[in-house]
Image (tube, rainbow, N blue to C red):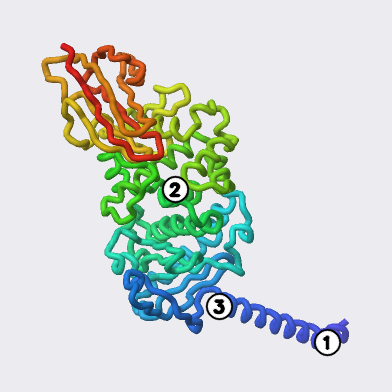
Amino acid sequence: MKQRLVRAAPKIRKSMNTLFLISFLTAFFALSQIHVFARSSVIEEPFLSLETISKEAREAVSVRTLLYKGKYTRIWIYKDLMKKFSETSDKTMKAVFQSVEKKVIPALLETFSVTAEDAGIDKKHPVDIVLDDVYEKSKHLYRGYYSPSKLGDHTILIDLNLAESASVTNLKDPVLSTVYSLSHELTHVLFFQKKPDEEAWVNEGLADLMSFLLGRSLFGYDVYKVHSIDAYLRNPSRSLTSFDSWDPSGADYGKSFLYFIYLYDHFGGNDFLKALYQGSDTGLKGLQYALNTADGAQWIPAAIRSNASVYTHFSYALEVNDERLNRYRLFGFQSVLVPNQYQGDFDRAEVHDNPCGNLKPFQSAYVPIGPLISDQDALKTFTLSLEGTQQPLVAYRVKKNANGVISRIPLSALNGKPLSFKKDDFVLILNLGSEPSDYDLELTDTE
């Protein structure tokens, strides 16, 4: 027995040595892979900087350094900014990278029901995320930037300072704050591969919607651009289909986000988003295709699912924000809390006896009756007539009865009959056509 043990020992030692060598090589290979995966400071490429975008006279280039490389993305930093890339930045961006690779992009692909290859974002076509002083250089509210014409259709600039602080949102976690911004920009990348000619108001509304939905479903937070929504709600008479990205108030971002969250809530949720992505049309035509085909929207009559009807109901929702007042719950919002203090208290233009102005396509005007009624009057009777330079220009007298039920009467159906108004009643005028239109609303006191 002893002899066998003695003879077996060399075999055991040999096996142990072999196992040790295999383990060492495996660990070394794994560590080397982690090093390549986590940081590669030897890869450098020329790259356009945000600082040069506004300088059309010349195309300066910067050198970028690869930080992390994954299945869908590569994260870079400009070489001259490496001195700002602290240990905190590195820790934050590693967590951001993992979240983007494992959660955000897979969720985007699932939402739009498309593979990475068909979407055009895979190992052969990775998305380049470049850390830059976006906020400082743009002198604007931007924390992320995507411009296919200036940077290429697979490149995103993201603000380096997000890795150090979370000032861009009310999130206290810089990882989540950065992921929130990246979710917006990655939606742009994905949608551009499918619809490169999509209109700005659709692109921005959809991107803000996806940032909100992914934040809620993947990370458990509800974040949206409160300042933009606030700016829009204080002046909701803005054309749905126009977009000013340089407006410092951000009101058009608030407008487009609220419209898309409204569409998502009421017309099919993810079914609506899939249909929007899969259709070939853009702008209002693309929305109409999604409204017509989204499975989750079919319970609502087709007539109500027209662009004109949806926008009209959306305009009511901005003012009354109470789903109970409509059979299909279309007079309110579900996913976001539109503050009640805005109801009937918009910062509108001065109201006078004959409100007039110009409405762009899919723009509305709210004419409150309150300023026309004195404190001594509980009711006041007016006759109303509307003239416009383009059709279809429509107007409704909107009021609540004692039970809170909304009454909507088209002015065209009144035939000049006088109507009694209370202080919180209003007239809603909408341009549902394709051309701008002047309007002149005549309110004649019949008392």
Point 57% across, 63% down: residue: 121
Q: Position of residue 341 (x, y in %)?
A: 25, 33
Nearer the observer, disc 1 or disc 2?
2
Residue 275 lies left or right of residue 317; in this view the side is: right
Nearer the observer, disc 2 or disc 3?
2
Reading the image, the residue beneath label 1 is: 6
32 shown above or below 434: below
Q: Position of residue 152 (x, y in %)?
A: 48, 68
Point 28% across, 14% down: residue: 416
Q: Considering the image in quadrants, where does the C terminus appear?
A: top left
Q: Position of residue 345 (x, y in %)?
A: 23, 32
Residue that protrudes farthest toward the front in the picture: 389
Reading the image, the residue beneath label 2 is: 202
Mark 1 nearby-residue class (10 Å; few <14, some 14–19, many ≥20): few
Q: Considering the image in quadrants, where does the N terminus appear?
A: bottom right
Disc sitting over residue 36 in the figure: 3
Residue 230 lies left or right of residue 181; in this view the side is: left
